[in-house]
Amino acid sequence: MSVEPTGPVDGARFEQLVARVAELARRLEAIERRLGGLSGEQAQIELEPAVSESFAVATEPRPERESATVRWVSLIGRTLLVMAGAFLIRALRDTGAVPSWIPAVAGLVYAAFWLAVAAKQRSRADSAVLHVTAAMLVAYPLVGEATLRFTIFPAPLAVAIVTGFALACVALTGWLQLAAIGWIGILGGIGTLFVLASGTRHLLAVTVALLVIGAVLEPLAGSRVWKHLRWPVALTLDAMLLMIVLILGISHGWPETNPPLPVAVVGGLLVVTALVYAGGLAYRTLIAGRPAGLFGLAQPVLAVGIALVGALILARENSSVLTAVGLLVLVLGTGCYAAAFSLADRRRGHERNFYFYSTLGGVLLLGGTPIAFGAAQLAVVSSVLALVTVTLGRRLDRFTLRYHGAVYAVVATVSAGLIRTGLRLFACGPLEKVSNLGAPGLMAAAASVGCLLLLLTRRRGDGVSAWRLAPELLVALAASWNALAVSVWAGAHALSATGLTGGAAVATWGTALVSILTVVYAWTGARSAISELRWLAWVLLGGGLVKLVLADMRFGVPVATCVSLAFLGGALIIISRIARRSANPL
């Protein structure tokens, strides 16, 4: 049958009809191949994109949701069966048919078995986590009940069992690379240890257990799965140590019926804790070459601080503990300096480590000296440290060392009593009320002057900022005060030997020294680029004027006042002439 066209047909429309017929033929051929039993690879046809996407959306997610649901239902059911086995062991104990220790040991073996099963689930994380959870729900409550209620396990053994399960979870964390397992074991173990500590009062056993867990976790902290597990352990250990120290510090605060707390053992725990966390920080930053985080920096400082506080409290019972902790702090301070300037400062990107180690080293040396040797020796040690650090800072061109040397010089000045002695001398009080400077005061004064000479003779570039000149200014202030105090003290004793014991003579001698030192600083500062001396000249001049009004004139001795005015007036005239002739105006 033929169909006659009723009108003209253009070429474009005819080509569209041919293309549609060819497409229908291809689809029909594909259907025939499928019906003929050909393989899916031979019968595959290019479907429309919209049809393919709708087919995928409609069919793919449902099997995944169904398999996940079925898997979780199966895992929860298996966990309930594990708990059912634990309660069966518990029921065996209640029957009294066997000794009570047999069900307790069987329960621990049962929990360990499921930990071993979890270790084999490397490809199924959810199954491993649920098995570990079930094992810990069996082990930790069993240990607590067997120890506190039935007294089957002695407290030290119970603490050791809890520690073993916690460390087993830590090992599984690395084996399976699942941080959740570590959190389950660590948090559950900490909670059980707290229950045992409150129920048995064996604080030392619990503290040792926490220290062992912390020592195991500390070198592992660089790995991702163990990174944060040490936080709860370290903080709990700090709390336990503080609790023990406070109990020992309170008179009659620990009943004799409770387990003893030997002072030497507590001191050893304080020292070992400080070493563990300080060593962990040194390993990560110096050997592994990783920058330390906030907690990694804070926990060693906290551990050392607790050791210092504990040493001060425990010293009432045993002075050797105080000496041991003080020596430890000095060793750590020296180690911090060595780490800062031998390793940390050579690596780019480790500026935070460098400043942390150097600052902590200075604080530890200053804090450990009075603890190890007594407060009277702080001035001597600070004087030596000032000279050493300033010398090294000048030779190595280290601003940090020069700054620390300036701080040590100030500390030596204060600890030697030069501030108090100088104030009494400049106030022109009775000479018999002025304490003798002694060897520490003279050594502090000599050290500060020596540091000033070392800093002023070093080479420096042009355009040095005021911040970079801060060490020189601090040392100059300390050296000026110490030199004036020692000079006034020596002059006052010399005047008293000649019979001039009045306060007016001492006041005039002090004003003359201030005037002379002002001129020296102005002349030295004008002839060099040491701007801190020019600043200090004005400071000394202002102090001399205040001293003239408040100290010298209150005695009402015309001759002494005349000499004081002459010295200050002459200093002002000389300074003005130096300023006019100098290229570096004051």
Image: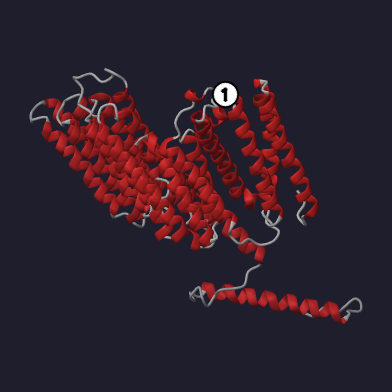
**283 in relation to 570, above or below:** below
Q: Is residue 469 left or right of residue 582?
A: left
Residue at image point 12% right, 32% down: 101
Query: Can you see residue 138?
Result: no
Quick one: quadrant of the N terminus?
bottom right
Q: Which residue bears the numbered disc 1?
A: 502
Residue at image point 48% right, 57% down: 392
Query: Whole-percent x and y of residue 241?
Result: 33, 33
Residue at image point 42% right, 39% down: 440
Q: Is residue 490 left or right of residue 584?
A: left
Query: Can you see residue 20?
Result: yes
Is 190 in front, or is 360? 360
Query: Whole-percent x and y of residue 459?
Result: 61, 62
Which residue extends farthest bottom?
11
Using a 10 Å C-alpha cutoff, classify the residue at mark 1 as few (fewer than 14 neighbours), some (14 to 19) or many (20 or more).
Answer: some
Query: Whole-percent x and y of residue 321?
Result: 27, 35
Q: How many marks?
A: 1
- The secondary structure type at the circle numbered 1 is loop
Which residue extends farthest front?
498
Query: Hey, which quadrant is residue 480 in on the image?
Result: top right
